[in-house]
């Protein structure tokens, strides 16, 4: 059977795209669907299949399999249920990309709780503003961030250190999901640039189906891609376009953890043999400014950017460094992607 992921040209996209064809890419349907199952569990049969490659700012590389994330997220889901967490309860997760981060995000979604990713560089005021707004039952964060934020009435703080992970390892490593497609799955905070205070955009589980349109035609994701998105998964680009959408299509994604360093990113792009890069315009400009791009050999076939326009000098840098056109993607956290080019598309002459 021909699927939407088999097409690459504009003409085929226009001729064959439909809502029914989009839903055929998923196990769930319009009534019952779970993001964690679609992104992780259904791809976990091969225990060696890589889901996420993490480039840490200290130079470490960490590879996580679908199987490992599936098992650890099931354990966290079981733990939450045992702790009295109910469907719809919010769980704030303020961690850098790591096994603990993915276990928590997908574990929340498995048991029907609502995952609330939060940017790790928020100070106490920024963090409290969002925590007061979403009223989570649990905050998962590092000890340093917990000390910085301080105690919050009604919020249990979990620090995923070795002691907690050892305890978590005693819980069941399989969890049967049962969420409706319209159940709430995640709160995604905006950057606050369009209003006085940031607002949590509420996403249901079926949002992963909708965002896959942007994956197909905005970032150009296809099976076989080696994908990378350096944007933090606390933001819409990093979570939906850089994490959930590629994983839902069974594509390995690459992410960045820690304080951003453009040279470290380029080393990861080379070492991971990345073929599809989706980044903010700022990332490309920082790669240009660091001045080390000529040290690396890239395998890039598709490029996209978002966040702001790219200036002329950065466009010239992209052209001479990656030898591929960088395609734009415009949208907002509130309503998603609006306008795109189509990376990797076969153009009709």
Image (cartoon, rainbow, N blue to C red):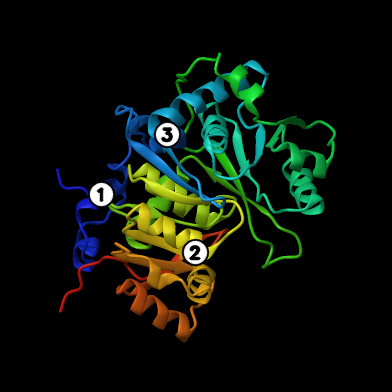
The residue beneath circle 2 is: 263
Of all residues shown, which one is farthest toward the bottom?
A: 312
Give the image quarter of residue 112.
top right
The quarter of the picture where the N terminus appears is top left
Asked if residue 306 is positioned above or below residue 87 in the image, the reply reads below
**Labels 1 and 3 touching (C-beta < 8 A):** no
The residue sitting at 50% across, 23% down in the picture is: 74
Compare marks 1 and 2 and give the one earlier in the sequence: 1
Locate residue 86 relative to residue 110 in the image: left or right. Answer: right
Locate residue 224 relative to residue 85 in the image: left or right. Answer: left
The residue sitting at 31% across, 27% down in the picture is: 45
Mark in the foreground, 1 or 2? 2
- Image position, residue 232 (x, y; %): 56, 54
Q: Give 15 or 208, whichever is nearer the viewer.
A: 208
The Cα–Cα distance between marks 1 and 3, rounded to whole angstroms, is 25 Å
Q: Residues within 10 Å of mark 2 (few under 14, many from 20)?
A: some
Q: Answer yes or no: is residue 213 visible.
A: no
Asked if residue 255 is positioned above or below residue 328 in the image, the reply reads above
Locate residue 341 relative to residue 140 in the image: left or right. Answer: left
The residue sitting at 42% across, 43% down in the picture is: 52
Mark number for residue 298? none
Mark in the foreground, 2 or 3? 2
Secondary structure category for the residue under label 1: loop
Mark number for residue 224? 1
Compare marks 1 and 3 and give the one earlier in the sequence: 3
The residue beneath circle 3 is: 33
Mark in the foreground, 1 or 3? 1
Secondary structure category for the residue under label 2: helix
């Amino acid at each position: 059977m021909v699927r939407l992921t088999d097409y690459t040209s504009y003409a085929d996209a226009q001729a064959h795209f439909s809502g029914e064809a989009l839903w055929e890419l998923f196990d769930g349907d319009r009534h019952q669907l779970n993001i964690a199952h679609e992104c992780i569990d259904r791809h976990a049969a091969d225990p060696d299949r890589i889901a996420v490659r993490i480039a840490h700012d200290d130079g470490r590389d960490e590879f996580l399999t679908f199987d490992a994330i599936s098992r650890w997220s099931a354990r966290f889901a079981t733990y939450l249920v045992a702790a009295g967490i109910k469907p719809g309860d919010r769980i704030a997760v303020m961690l850098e990309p790591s096994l603990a981060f993915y276990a928590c995000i997908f574990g929340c979604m498995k048991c029907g709780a609502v995952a609330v990713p939060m940017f790790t560089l928020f100070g106490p005021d920024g963090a409290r503003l969002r925590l007061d707004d979403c009223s989570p039952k649990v905050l998962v964060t590092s000890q340093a961030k917990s000390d910085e934020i301080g105690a919050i009435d009604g919020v249990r703080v979990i620090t995923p250190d070795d002691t907690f992970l050892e305890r978590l390892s005693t819980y069941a490593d399989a969890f049967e999901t049962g969420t409706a497609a319209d159940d709430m799955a995640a709160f995604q905070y905006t950057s606050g640039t369009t209003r006085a205070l940031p607002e949590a955009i509420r996403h249901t589980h079926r949002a992963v189906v909708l965002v896959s349109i942007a994956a197909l035609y905005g970032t150009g994701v296809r099976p076989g891609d080696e994908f990378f998105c350096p944007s933090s998964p606390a933001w819409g680009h990093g979570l939906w376009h850089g994490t959930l959408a590629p994983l839902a299509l069974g594509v390995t994604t690459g992410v960045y953890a820690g304080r951003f360093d453009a040279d470290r990113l380029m080393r990861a792009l080379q070492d991971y043999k990345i073929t599809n890069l989706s980044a903010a315009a700022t990332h490309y400009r920082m790669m240009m400014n660091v001045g080390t791009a000529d040290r690396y050999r890239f395998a890039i076939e598709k490029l996209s950017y978002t966040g702001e326009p790219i200036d002329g000098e950065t466009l010239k840098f992209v052209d001479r460094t990656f030898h591929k056109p960088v395609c734009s993607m415009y949208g907002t956290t509130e309503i998603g992607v609006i306008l795109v080019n189509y990376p990797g598309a076969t153009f009709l002459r």
